[in-house]
Image (spheres, rainbow, N blue to C red):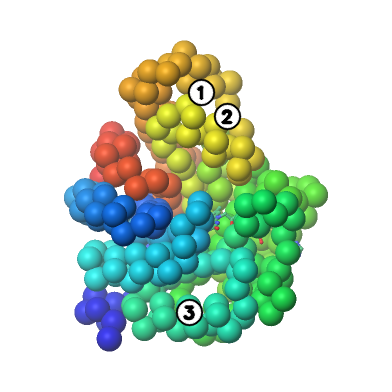
Amino acid sequence: MPPPHSATPVRLAEIYARDAPVVSCELFPPKDQRGLGRLWRSVALLETIAPDFYSVTYGAGGTTRDMSIQVAEELVGRVTAPVASHITIVDQSKEEIRAVLDHFERAGVENLVAIRGDPPSGQENWIPHPEGWEHTIDLVREVAQRGTFGIAVAGFPEVHPEAPDAATDLGFLVEKLAVGGDVVITQLFFDDRDYFAYVDTARAAGITVPIVPGLLPVLSSAQIRRIVTLCGARIPPDLDHQLAEAGDDADLAREAGIRWTTDQVTDLIAGGAPGIHLYTLNKARATRRILRETGLR
Ligand code: FAD
């Protein structure tokens, strides 16, 4: 039976219809049971800033799908804010994905972040599961037909690395929204001009839904350099310089990263962004500090 708070589901479209900027925090499931303790301590700290919703990644970065499902389900019982689980179509048949959707419905997960997922490590190109869906649009259509979830889809201000060009990439975003996406959450970026230009182009292409900037607070030089290699985001020269100056002083790099994200949040909200989606990497202290310093919490 779903926990009591899900009796009045709060879908993403309703959340972003509110007047105040929406704060959402993305968590990732740990690799093993031991990591769960650390995750729940982070959640307890995040609860003190009352995010408008949480999201939980799915099968990313070496974590298992079972753990993703377990964490999303348990989170519903632990927090009062709505929970969005990410779901991908990597290496799963349609029937397997439908079973996961059934499970989320029963568990009281009100929203989904519907994405394709990256090819498994060691595999360069995207190869759909033989009995699965080929593109994210198929997943979004399936989820939307159920009518039980709010749906976020991903957008790429710096263009998805596999896309031939920005216009083609945006065309696919238009299609994902046409079949049922309620909001767009962007890939991480460090230069706000990329976000604002993306929003302008998206609006010109007829996209009217909220486009939520996804931000990653940089916590170390090594971390950020690894992540940008994976997702293709650009590190602006100024941030690059600050991280280089910090060298292997982890505290300095962390301070530079938090300052950068704090400035981004301030600038993006002032420029009309509907909220901020923080890729917390389960580091609640940095997230809390950024939200306090920007006055969002
Ligand atoms: P898509 O929109 O499917 O685009 C992927 C590529 O295919 C693009 O080049 C696009 O131009 C092209 N394309 C799209 N539609 C079509 C079509 N109909 N025909 C032909 N080509 C098409 N990964 C995880 O593994 N787990 C997660 O939980 C996770 N969460 C994420 C959350 C957010 C907000 C973001 C931005 C990314 C997340 N990722 C996650 C990473 C994501 O899986 C990768 O970025 C992936 O490469 C793209 O997924 P997508 O659904 O955005 O892409």
Q: Which residue sits furthest top?
A: 245
Q: Is mark 2 within 8 Å of ligand 1?
A: no
For this view, does 167 lie left or right of residue 60?
Answer: right
Among the 4 quarters of the image, the one containing residue 76: bottom left
N-term mark: 1 or 3: 3
Q: Is mark 3 within 8 Å of ligand 1?
A: no
**Residue type of the residue flagged with mark 3:** Leu
Q: Where is residue 43 in the image (x, y as percent from the top left)?
A: 26, 54
Quarter of the image with the N terminus in it: bottom left
Q: Where is residue 42 in the image (x, y as percent from the top left)?
A: 26, 49
Question: Which mark lies nearer to you, 2 or 3?
Answer: 3
**Residue type of the residue flagged with mark 1:** Leu
Q: Is mark 1 within 8 Å of ligand 1?
A: no
Among the 4 quarters of the image, the one containing residue 145: bottom right
Residue 90 visible here: yes
Separation (CA) of disc 2 from disc 1: 6 Å
Q: Is mark 1 on a helix, strand or loop?
A: helix
Q: What residue is shown at x 51% (from left), y 67% (from top)?
A: 87
Q: Where is residue 116 in the image (x, y as percent from the top left)?
A: 62, 63
Please tell me which residue lies in front, 96 or 188. Answer: 96
Please tell me which residue lies in front, 149 or 28. Answer: 28
Residue for badge 3: 101
Among the 4 quarters of the image, the one containing residue 93: bottom right
Separation (CA) of disc 2 from disc 3: 36 Å
N-term mark: 2 or 3: 3
Find residue 239 and name its label.
Answer: 1
Circles 2 and 1: CB atoms closer than 8 Å:
yes
Image: 186 above or below 53: above
Residue for badge 2: 235
**Residue type of the residue flagged with mark 2:** Ile
Q: Residues within 10 Å of mark 2 (few under 14, many from 20)?
A: some
For this view, does 290 lie left or right of residue 17?
Answer: left
